[in-house]
Image: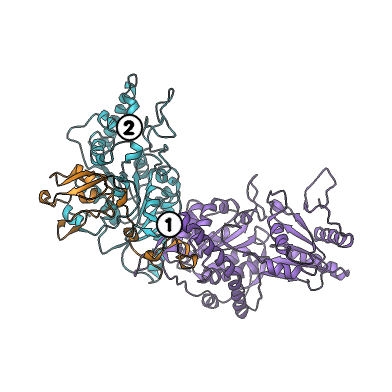
Chain colours: A orange, B purple, C cyan
Amino acid sequence: MIHAKDINEKTPWQELTPGGEIYEAGTARLYNTGTWRTDTPFFKQENCKHCMLCVPYCPDSAIPVQDGKRQDFVFMHCKGCGICAEICPFEAIEMTPGGAPK
Amino acid sequence: MMKFMSGNEAVAYAMKQIDPDVMGAFPITPSTDIPEVFAGYVANGEVNTEYVAVESEHSSMSVCIAAQAAGARAVSATSSCGLALMYELLYVAASSRLPISMACVNRALTGPININNDHSDSMGARDSGWIQLYAENNQEAYDNFIQAMPIGESPAVRLPVMTCMDGFITSHAMENIELLETAAVKAFVGEYRPEHYLLKKDNPLAIGPYDISAYYMEHKVQGAEAMKAAKARILEVAAEFEKVSGRKYGLIEEYRLEDAETAVVLIGSSAGTGKAAVDRLRSQGVKAGLIKIRVFRPFPGEELARALAKTQAVAVLDKSEGFSANGGPVFAETRSALYDLKDRPALVNIVYGLGGRDIRVEDFERVFGRLADIAASGETGPVYVHMGQRSQAQEVMA
Amino acid sequence: MSIRYNQKREAEKQPRLTGGHRMCAGCGAGIVVSGVLRALEPEDRAVVVNATGCVEVSTFMYPYTAYMDSFIHSAFENAAATCSGVEAAYNALKRRGKVDGTVKFITFGGDGGTYDIGFQSLSGAMERGHDMVYVCYDNEAYMNTGVQRSSSTPRFSRTTTSPVGSVQPGKRQQKKDLTEILVAHNIPYVAQTAPIGNFRDLHLKSHKAIYTAGPCFLNILAPCPRGWDYPAAKLADIIKLAVDSCVWPLFEVEEGQWRVTYTPKKKLPVEDYLRSQGRFRHMFQPGNEWMIEEAQQQIDQKWERLLERAGG
C-alpha cells in the first residue's frame, strides 16, 4: 500500500496511487499550515476553566483535549485566526503579533 | 440457448445474468428499453440490484461513479444527449479509475434533435479515457457487454467500458442470438474485488482529490498506460470468451482481406451491409475486403496498419462528422496509424449515415468502384467527402 | 430521538475533520464541517461527500485528506447524486453480506453547489429517499472562485459579479429560500442552524439529521471573512448578530412540523448585522436609507411567517 507520507513532488508516476486515491485517514495532519500565521494565540493555562468552548470554534481542529483538559494549541495547524481568543469567556487566550508561539 | 431478441433486450438480459449491484437508470431514445426491461427484472425480484431511477443522465453517471468507488459494480445505459450530459463525469469515472460498464446505444447528437443512428455521441467521448467496444449486431452487443467487466476491472486496466451498438438498427431490430447460461456468465464475469473502496472497513478511501500540477500529469500518464495495457487484456478476455461461447473476437475484424486490393474500414452495423457488398464484388472477381473496428479505444493502430499494408486503396467510413474540415475521427486515426508503413495505400474518407441516413449495398459498390479507380489511376482525388446527401453540385460520392 | 448535549464530552471526541486542511484562517465552513461530523457516534463509520468548492479543494489536496472517514468528490453539480450512489452501493452490498456495521452518508456543498448548480441533483436525491444528510454550508456567494453572487447572496450584497456602482445597489435579487424549498420535498427532517453559542443547536440538529432514516437537509450559515469583509476573529459575533436580528433564524421542520429553536430575547435591528460587514457598507451611505428599510421589512415579514408556521 502506498502511504501519503511517501508521496511528494519528486515521486515518479509508477509510485503514485492510481487516480489520486489515498488509503489512510487524516493525512492532512502531515501538512503544516502553521506557517500561515501572522498572529499567534497564547494559551494562559492558569486562566483556563476547561469549558471547551474554544474547541468547536477552531476551524483547524488545532485545540486538542485530553482527559477532560484543554491542551495547548497544535501550532503546526493553527492559522492564527483569533476566533478562540474572541470567544473565550475567561481571557485564557491572548493573541500575540507574529507567527511564532510565545 | 437461442433466443429472438432486440439488441436492447440482449444487453438488458446480459445485465440480468451479471446481476450488478447498482444501476443508474434514466430513459433516452433509443436506449430506453435497457432500463425498462431491467426494471421488470427488479420488480420481479430476479436481480439483487439497487435500481436508482435518477432525474438525469448526469446523476445516473454520478451514481455509477460513487457506487463503483464504494465497492459496488455499477452499470448504466444511455444515448446521444444523455451521453453528452454525462460528459464531465465520463472524465471523472476514467480518471478515478472506476471500471463502470455502460451500454451506449448510438444516436445522432443534437442539433437539430434527431433520434436515429450515427456515432456522433460516442465519438465525442472518445478522448475521455473510456474503453470503447462497438457491436455490429445483437449477438455482439450481448457478447461485448459480458466481456466489459473482465476487461475494465482487471487491476492493470481499471478503466470504465462503453459498449456501443447502433440505435434502432441494432437496438430495436430482432435477431436470433445465442445466449450463454447464466451460471456461465456469472463464472466468466466473476466477483468484483477492488483492493480499496469507500465502504471498506479496514481502512478509509479518499477519492477525487484536488490534484495540483505536481501530480496531475503523473496521474494522466497512469491512465494512458492503463489504456495501453487494455489492448492485451481485451484480447485475453476475448480468448477466454471464445472458450465459453465458441465466438471469436479481436480488436478488429478482417473480412476477406487476405489478398484484397481495395478495402473499407468502418464501425458498427454497416459492416453487415459492407460484407454483402464485398461478397457480391468478390463473386465478380473484384479483390475487395473490409475491416470492422470493434475496439476504438484503445485504438488498434498497429493492427490496422498490418492488416491494410498490402492494399492499394482504402476508404475509411465515418458515421459522424467531426467538423475538423479535415475528415472524421476514424479517418484521422486510421490515416495516422498507417503513416509508418513503407508502402501506404491511398486513403480517402467518406462521411455517411448521419442522423439515420441509410447506406445500401449499392452505396458500398460505388465506394469500391471509386477505390478501384484510385488504385488504377494513382490519383486519390478529394480525400474528405460526404455520401448520401442531396446536392446541387456534382459531388464525388453524393 | 432526543439526546442530551454535553459540550465538554463532545469536545473530547477525536475530530473527524483534521487540521492541516487549506481553508482560510477563520473560515466558517471549517467550523461547520467539523461541527457536523462531531455529531457522529464514534463507533459509526461515515462516507463524506463534497461538491467542488472551498471545502473540497482545501480538504483533499493530494495526497492530504483532512477526513478521518472515507471521502469522495466527483464534481461541482452532483454531490447529492454522488451521495445517493454511495448509499445505493451500501444497500446492495449489505444485502449481499459484503459490508457490515453502520455507515452514515454526509454530503457538504457550498451555496453555489447547493442553491444553484447542484440544485437538480439535490432535489432528485431528496425525492428518491436515500438515507443521507445533505449539508449546505451557506457562505452566500461563490467564494472559491473569488466572491461571485449566487442565488443565496442576499439582496444588496456586494460581490464581484454584483458590484456596487452608480446605477446598481449591489445584488438586485432576493436570497432564494432554499430551506423552505427542501421542506416542500416532504422529507423527514429539514433544519437551519449555525455554529452559535456552545454549539448545542448545531450539534443536536446534526445528530438528528444523521440518525433520522431517510433524506435530511441542513442549511448552516458559514461566514466567510474574505467574502463578507470582516475581521476573521469576529466570526462568533457575526453569527450572533445574524441570528439575533432574525436574518438567519434557527428552526427545524420534523415530519412537517415547524419549530423555531431559538427566539432572540430582543430582536436586533438588521442594521446591526449589516454594519458588521464590508459587503453591505454602501447601504450606509447617505441616500441609501431605503435599502436598510427594505431589508428590515423583508426580514420582519419572513420572521413573522416563520412564527406563524411554527404555531406562533
Q: A28 and C246: which one is in front?
A: A28
Left or right: where A9 falls relative to B325: left
Which label belongs to residue B331? Answer: none
The amino acid on which the numbered mark 2 sits, given as a three-letter code, is: Gly
Left or right: where C201 falls relative to B65: left
Farthest residue in the top direction?
A: C287
Q: Residue at x 37, y 58 (%)?
A: C64
Q: Residue at x 62, y 66 (%)?
A: B141
Distance of label 2 from label 1 (alpha carbons): 33 Å
Q: A10 and A53: which one is in front?
A: A10
Residue C138: image quadrant is top left
The amino acid on which the numbered mark 1 sits, given as a three-letter code, is: Pro
According to the picture, the residue beneath numbered tag 2 turns out to be C278
**Residue C154 x/y as whole percent:** 36, 34
Residue A4: image quadrant is bottom left
**Residue C273 x/y as whole percent:** 27, 32
Residue B172: image quadrant is bottom right
Left or right: where B41 falls relative to A81: right
Which label belongs to residue B209? Answer: 1
Q: Residue at x 15, y 61 (%)?
A: A67
Secondary element at image label 2: helix
Left or right: where C68 falls relative to C115: left
